[in-house]
Image: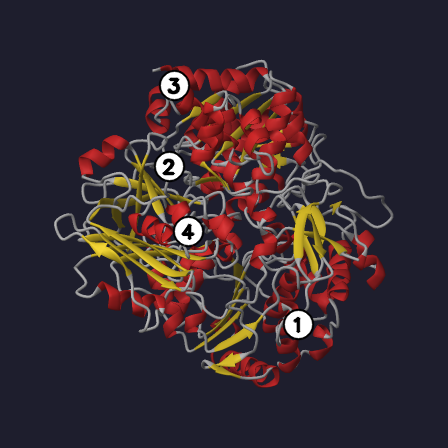
Amino acid sequence: MAAEVKTTCPYCGVGCGVLATIDEAGAVSVKGDPEHPANFGRLCSKGSALAETIDLDGRLLYPEIAGERSDWDEALDLVARRFSETIAEHGPDAVAFYVSGQLLTEDYYVANKLMKGFIGSGNIDTNSRLCMSSSVAGHRRAFGADTVPGTYEDIELADLVILTGSNLAWCHPVIYQRLAAAKTARPNMRIVVIDPRRTMTCDIADLHLAIRPDGDVALFMGLLAHLATSPAIDQNYIAAHTEGFAEAFAAAAALDINDLLERTGLPAMQIREFFRLFETTPKVVTCYSQGVNQSSSGTDKVNAILNCHLATGRIGRPGMGPFSLTGQPNAMGGREVGGLANMLAAHMAIENADDRDRVQRFWNSPVIAAKPGLKAVDMFRAVADGRIKALWIMATNPVVSMPDADSVESAIAACPFVVVSDILKETDTTRHADVLLPSLGWGEKDGTVTNSERRISRQRPFLDIPGDARADWWQLAEVGRRMGFAGAFDFDAPDAIFAEHAALSAFENNGSRDFDIGARAGMSGGAYEELSPFQWPHAAGTAPSVTRFFAEGGFFHPDGKARFVAVKPPATDRTNAEYPFTLNTGRIRDQWHTMTRTGKSARLSAHIAEPFAEIHPRDAIETGISSAGLVEIDSPHGKAIVRALVTDRQARGGIFAPMHWNDQFAARARIDAVVAPITDPVSGQPASKNVAVAVRPFRATHYGFAVSATKPATPDAAYWALAKAAGGWRLELAFGENVEDWTAWCRAVFAIPAEIEPLGYADRQSGDLRLAFFDGEVLLAALFLAREPVAVARNWAISQLSASHGDLRKRFALVAGRPGAGRPDPGATVCSCFSVGVNQIAAAVRGGCHSVEAVGKETSAGTNCGSCRSEIGRIIDRCLAAAAE
């Protein structure tokens, strides 16, 4: 009988429920949980492919010290001793933890307790600093607490949804599908997208405001000034529940129309229409994400948005309010336990003496951090200059994800003692570890996570624990015990940690703090195991319920009132003659963070298989960059080489590049190495969306594409990008100089035995070369070379890894790089969920399928997560336009 386990997706902050099933043969399958209130059965492409990412390839299975296998006692004794010695000699601020929104709440809680309550330093920060800290800072300034007022349902109930700095279709696909379904059901709903790029999300927008980078503060200042003189202003709400309106309005009113137009780069007509929609639509939700947060003015952007909702009283009621879309699965849980350097557990403030005393008394700890610790960028600066001498990195890959990533790598490499807890043995960060500790992965972990709407859900284990891997909370507790704090870290299971976390949230609370889950403080192990998703707050003696905040005031400043924040527009242009382009970094649909999980799935790599940069056609012409050529991006901090994607969806003067690729999957594609370590002065969040760069074509003597049944060795090439593929691997290549013996090169990279001779040809005049290696009927590897980017039917070539090649004609077809008659090429993958290619969709259109729904019925494309529906629609439009010519 197949066993079904209810758990939660480990990707974005939507927090989708997942049903994981293990059949009698041990095979795992996943589907959306129809009862989970976050997704009601929907999953995105990444969630749908979770079962493809849980293999043990590359797993770190045993502790290692200096690259040699060890055991837990030796490794943990060493960690505890080195941290204790460093503290004794240099003080508590000489050590630091850098943790992650990939941790479960229980892991996060123990890490925060150990660092702030027993080591006595605030030096614990998290990769959530890179994505959500501006929202935290804005909430705390306005509301007095890091409170998300609304729920996902509000997005469906609103009559106007504003998406600013959010490519919802690709970054939060399940919420996008809920919004798209609501708009289909209520066509009068209006959607506004504010984004310098025309992303896939814009395809359901009624208005796209292609704003200049960092123009958001000015736009929402202008909106506040407009609302203040309109019928939409709610003077009663302002008077009863807020402070500071006059100052915020005066700052906004000082921004004249010409300055507004210049700073936003928007036509006056579009600005007037946006203001009119907000003014005349009471039920308005403003969703914001990384395009707002990842900015040197991120906190001001958040407060400029909050100001407009406070001024109209449109907050905390169904279909109304600001909504911060969380990036990671447990960024919210980390915020609840004080995972940021400037916070205490249970949403208490490290700068508040009463809060520090309260937490210290609850923990019965010998010390408590007396001041905020170092935020992420400053933390790694302190590692670089020697102030931090012992560093523990958990469940994250800062050598890839931090700004100025090359400097971060140098700092970690030079640090006297580095511990890394991870599930993979080889990442860009683990290569610098003195001690490697094997952690549990998704399907093995046991604990809780909190999503964007404050809903706490369980992640439950359904896989056997591999090797000697252990939970992160266990590793931390063991080190705490070995440092002399045994009584405080005597946890034997995650339910005990969660119970303590819940008890702290209720300790001396009496409604004075927003985060209270005291009703869960006394749970037994069985109740924890059966815990259903619930939204906080859930105070002792109350029933769980869907909760909104602030409709009738009740803010968490001492006087119970919200604060308007007077903001000012920042300088938006960082470019100059040497670095004339603005780089915007972000995510793509089918990859996640630094690809340590999604990079294992062939299906997820089929849509976009290599790093790229979007550039406007006119900019491409002026810089000499060709479509599908290679482009070098550089700044004073670093360089990257990626594929050029020439598209008019990108604004002139701007470049977009994803942040996922790293040294495990590409030669020089760590785009955060290019990003300057400029941060928001309040939140400390890096400005990853507005980076001055230069771009130029990267000239190669030869370009290549290869397929291989086994994972290739790192190739000797100026550019390479590796991706998992059905039946093996695919490899994109470019060479700065000619290789004398391509057959020998293939033998080295693809591990081809000496007795196997290649089938192929070389054309000296054109520069084309084809080599294929067969072992009987099995294709081992094939290489395609040309002087220009190789025109080969890639998905078809990949499919040949799984085909039989007993027929000599099939071998020659492969060498030719194209399928023979009667063997259609599916084309580039559009729908990752069902592996449907562009040529298959085009064929369906030619066959009479003239709508996304009809294509879905014919091919299944777009019928699962739906995040490819926009692309399908554009393919339909192109095919119909071509047919009409």
Q: Is label 4 in a helix, a strand or a loop?
A: helix
Q: CA distance from mark 1 to mark 4?
A: 43 Å
Q: Earlier in the sequence, mark 3 or mark 1?
A: 1
Residue wearing tag 1: 474
Residue wearing tag 2: 570
Q: Residues within 10 Å of mark 4 (few under 14, many from 20)?
A: many
Residue wearing tag 3: 883
Dot in front, 4 or 2 = 4
Q: Earlier in the sequence, mark 1 or mark 4?
A: 1
Q: Quadrant of the N terminus?
A: bottom right
Q: Is residue 222 above or below residue 558?
A: above
Q: Position of residue 791 (x, y in %)?
A: 29, 43
Q: Earlier in the sequence, mark 3 or mark 4?
A: 4
Q: CA distance from mark 3 to mark 1?
A: 63 Å
Residue 368 appearing in the image: no
Q: Earlier in the sequence, mark 3 or mark 2?
A: 2
Nearer to us in this view, 267 or 667 = 667
Residue type at numbered disc 1: Trp
Residue type at numbered disc 3: Ala
Q: Residues within 10 Å of mark 1 (few under 14, many from 20)?
A: many
Residue type at numbered disc 4: Ile
Instruction: Name the side, left or right, on which 857 lies relative to 848.
Output: right
